[in-house]
Each structure stands twice: as C-alpha cells, then as structure tokens.
Image (spheres, rainbow, N blue to C red):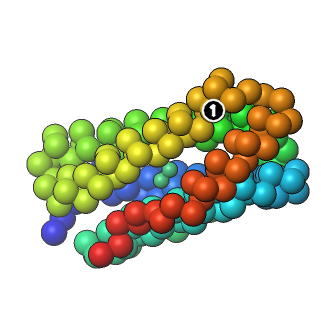
Amino acid sequence: MKISPKMKKALNDQTELEANASNTYLAMASWCEITGYEGSAAFFYVQAEEERQHMLKFVHYLNDLGVSAKIPGTKSPASNFKSLETIIKTALNNEQIVTKAIHNMVEIAQKEKDHSTYAFLEWFVNEQVEEEKKFETVLQKFGLIGRDKLAINEIDKILNTMSAIPIDTGAA
Ligand SMILES: [Fe+2]
Ligand SMILES: [Fe+2]
C-alpha cells in the first residue's frame, strides 16, 4: 500500500496535534486537581488518555503501511487557567481545530483516491462529532446552572460522572 507524501505529512502532523491535545488536557487536569476541582481533574485525565490513544492510532496506521511514523515533540502547554469555564471553552476550540484537520485529511484522501486512509479516518470523523458535543454540553451547564461557587461545584460533579463513562478508543 502506498500513500502520497502529502498524505503522509498530514498524518504525521495529526500525530503531533493529538499529542499536543493530550498534553494540554493533562495540564488542564493538573490545574483542576490543584485547584480542588476533583471531578474536573478526573475528567481531564481521562481526556488526556483518550488523546494519547488517538495519537497511537496514527502512529500504528503509518507503521502498518510501512511508512515510519514520526514521533512528535510536544509544545509546553499553558499551566495556569482563569476558570473552569475558560478551560472548557479552550478545549472546545481545540476540538474544532482537530475536526477541521481531520476533514482536511478526508478531502486529501478523496482527491487521491486513497481508500485505506479514507476508511481509517472514518472513525475519527465520528469521534470528533462526539468530542465537540461533549464539550458543548459541559459549556452549556454554566449558562444553565450558573457560575457561582455552588454552581461550579455542581458542574464539577457532572464532570466526575462523565469521567466514568467508558471511552471508545476504537481499539479492535
Ligand atoms: Fe483526538
Ligand atoms: Fe479530542
């Protein structure tokens, strides 16, 4: 199986994007933990793990094709955050960027009639719908419940519940 240099670069870039997403969620988890938002911390530790699984999917896919995957260095994520709400907004924003990158790869695969990569990416297309929905749902809670200390405590509990929902890593 051969993939084009353009597709190869896009897949390697995506590996980096997923690695950075994992690191960013790890930083968010750590901030939540030290701030006393235990549920949110649990939620973001799970997100960090999930993004790492995404990264590995790209690494394995490239290696399976015999194109050696480039293991990315990661950027130092921000370590200080204004509030739980800004964290969720940033997370949603990051997910939207990832969705665009995935869609962009799907278009390359379509143009190049790269059926294997197209099929591989399908899981990610669906996953991104779930990812955006997840953060949009949480963001809505601030409008619904509020932004005072009691409301944040309530939202923290909701995030704790969400952290316990088993994630679909797409592992066969
Ligand atoms: Fe991801
Ligand atoms: Fe994600």
- Identify the residue at image location x=29%, y=55%: 123
In the image, what residue occupies the spot 51% across and 61% down?
165
Instruction: Write down the residue under mark 1.
Output: 141
160 vs 45, nearest the viewer: 160
Q: Is residue 87 left or right of residue 105?
A: right
Q: Quadrant of residue 49?
A: bottom right
Residue 28 shows in this picture: yes
Whether residue 165 is situated above or below residue 134 in the rendered picture: below
Residue toward you, 102 or 7: 102
Residue 16, position in %: x, y? 52, 56
Residue 44 visible somewhere in the drawing: no
Place residue 80 in its image quadrant.
top right
Residue 76 placement (x, y as % from top left): 74, 53
Relative horizontal placement of residue 3, taking residue 33 as reference (left or right) = left
Q: Position of residue 72 (x, y in %)?
A: 56, 63
Q: Is residue 66 above or below residue 11?
A: below
Q: Locate the C terminus and report the quarter of the image it occupies.
A: bottom left
Q: Is residue 30 above or below residue 140?
A: below
User: Left or right: where does residue 135 sit relative to residue 89?
Assistant: left
In the image, taking residue 84 as reference, residue 172 lies left or right, namely left
What count of labels does the image hold?
1
Q: Residue at x 72, y 55 (%)?
A: 39
Amino acid type, label 1: Lys
- Tag 1 secondary structure: helix
Q: Is residue 52 above or below residue 143?
A: below
Please name whichever residue, 115 or 148, is drawn nearer the observer in this view of the structure: 148
User: Where's residue 26, x and y in %?
Assistant: 69, 59
Density class for disc 1 (Cα within 10 Å; few <14, some 14-19, many ≥20) is some
- The quarter of the picture where the N terminus appears is bottom left
